[in-house]
Amino acid sequence: MDYQYYDDEADYADEEDGLGAGGGGHANAYIDHEDFEQLRGHEYSDDNYGSVMDRLLDSYEHCILPSLTQVAGYIVPLLLGCLLCRLLSAVYARRARLVASASSSWQEANSMKLAPLHLINALCGAGILYATLGQRMLILQLLTGISYALLQLVRLGKGRRPAVALAVLSIGSQFIYELAIWQKRDDWPQLRGLQMVTNMKVISLAFDLTATGAAGLHMPNIVAYFGYILHPATCALGPWLSYARYLEVLHSKSQLRRNLCQMLLNVLLSLVALLVSNCIAPTLSELNAPAEPLGAHQGGWSHWLLMYTGALSVRTSHYFVSLLSQAQLAAVGQRLDVGASQGLLGDLVVRPWRIEWPHSLSALVRCWNIPMHEWLKRYVYATSKQEQLQTQGHAQTQTQTQAQTHSRHSTMVAVFCTYIVSSLLHGMDFRIYLVLLSLATFAEGETMLRRHLATLCNACVTANPCPGAERCRYAHCPRRLGWRSWTAWLVRLINLGFSLLAIAHLAYLGVVLLNDTLLGDSEHELPFMYHWSAAGYLSHYVGIGMFVLYMFLS
């Protein structure tokens, strides 16, 4: 996709987590889809239901109620740990007479005055991990200690090279851990998502330390480091949080009453997402499943509906995790680095409404995992592009056309580097690699084609949503022309077509991230590829076709 968003006013298009990020087994930024397989209800025993209502009633009895009962034991410790951390921090801040309006500097973070606050965060976070993971949290603590030892590498050099080396070691070590725990794969999926968030925090801290120019002077001590890594609002589900923002809100919290309302609303919405993922979407998949063998319906509407409902289960599982993490952030009073805030929900991790009805693929992935998007933007895309520009800067003077060509080339390389790093962060999952690299190809082709069409027709059909009638630079802007202009309707129709295409891509890519293959052939060499094969790899042909069309028009 077009990462001109980095350079313009608009935001950029990240993956990830894409569909995948961002993030888990379904590109979740925090944890894998496997983490919540235990919340799924009982399978239906009767395949011949009298009506749709019978299936829904059976789903309520055998899936909805068991899921709500089981997930309550998971949510309560998370929220209680966050509220306890907030209470203890407020009590200590009042007794120590800490000024609420003053943000802590990096040097002050290691002071004895703030050490109890770091310790409170670390202990509450460790308690949450123990409540959710049990003794498996000890493995995570060991890996966190190893990461702190690796962090000391930033003292040994100047510039960004030590931080880049740390990033390579952190991601590489995650692969080593996965191979080492290969015999216990049932335990690793939960730890893999948590370790990914830890790696993101350590890598961002390394880059921020090198940016200060005095990494050794600003290096957090062991108490501050564990307080940051084990922050109760981010240690169990994510999202990523920078060290500077952690210090800024260490003892300066927002209004408790408003945060409690935000917490309750996020919990309610997360439960709705969970029920859709575990009960409603599987029921719809059964309703859409053809009675005859799929061989006679491959690539037909029934199979695309089957893929859409399967992918819906993946997306709503991601919404459940993201909304629950938003509830934790509100409970502890923590703010995120990105200014994506909704009054009723607080700081946003995900925007489901912009994912279910996307303006484009690039706009969709920016909303999939907002904190991870910001992390990739700061520490992967910007670093990659800056390195390429510095390399090109050593060359002799170039013509304007050559400079534009090199700029586009560096942008495209930075985009694919961003997606590759995002894929590697999710561990050894071939499905994630396929989905994210396919997503990068589809989104980049769509973005370039729509940008060229917008320039060619002077119409507001770019991958970026329209900034408004006053700020849009195109003559044929629907918001400026109003509802009576036929050209405005034509522009809306073109944008509608791309939105529907993005929804089709979303179903096509998301369905392979299910843990099971819907009506797939178990003898297939790669079972999760079954649906792509059944659809004739149509989305891949369309994605490649957009590149070809762009090259033909340009």
Image (cartoon, rainbow, N blue to C red):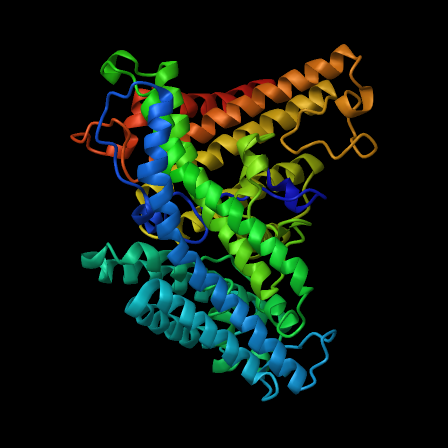
Residue 409 in picture, x, y percent from top left: 56, 39
Snapshot quadrant of residue 133: bottom left
- Counting labels gives 0
Say which of 394 and 13 sits in front. Answer: 13
Say which of 389 and 473 sits in front. Answer: 473
Say which of 240 and 159 sits in front. Answer: 240
Query: Is residue 113 rendered to the left or right of residue 155?
Result: right
**Quadrant in which the C terminus appears:** top right
At x 30%, y 16%, the residue is 298
Outermost residue toward the right in this view: 470
Query: Is residue 116 rendered to the left or right of residue 534?
Result: right
At x 80%, y 35%, the residue is 471
Above or below, comparing residue 130 to residue 355 in the picture: below
Above or below, comparing residue 135 to residue 43 in the picture: below
At x 44%, y 67%, the residue is 166
Residue 530 in picture, x, y percent from top left: 27, 27
Say which of 200 and 513 sits in front. Answer: 513
Residue 266 in picture, x, y percent from top left: 55, 50
**Quadrant in which the N terminus appears:** top right
Snapshot quadrant of residue 499: top right
Query: Is residue 417 rendered to the left or right of residue 435?
Result: right
Residue 100 in picture, x, y percent from top left: 71, 75
At x 58%, y 36%, the residue is 353
Outermost residue toward the bottom in this view: 112
Snapshot quadrant of residue 540: top left
Q: Is residue 72 visible?
A: yes
Outermost residue toward the left in this view: 523
Q: Is residue 20 visible?
A: no
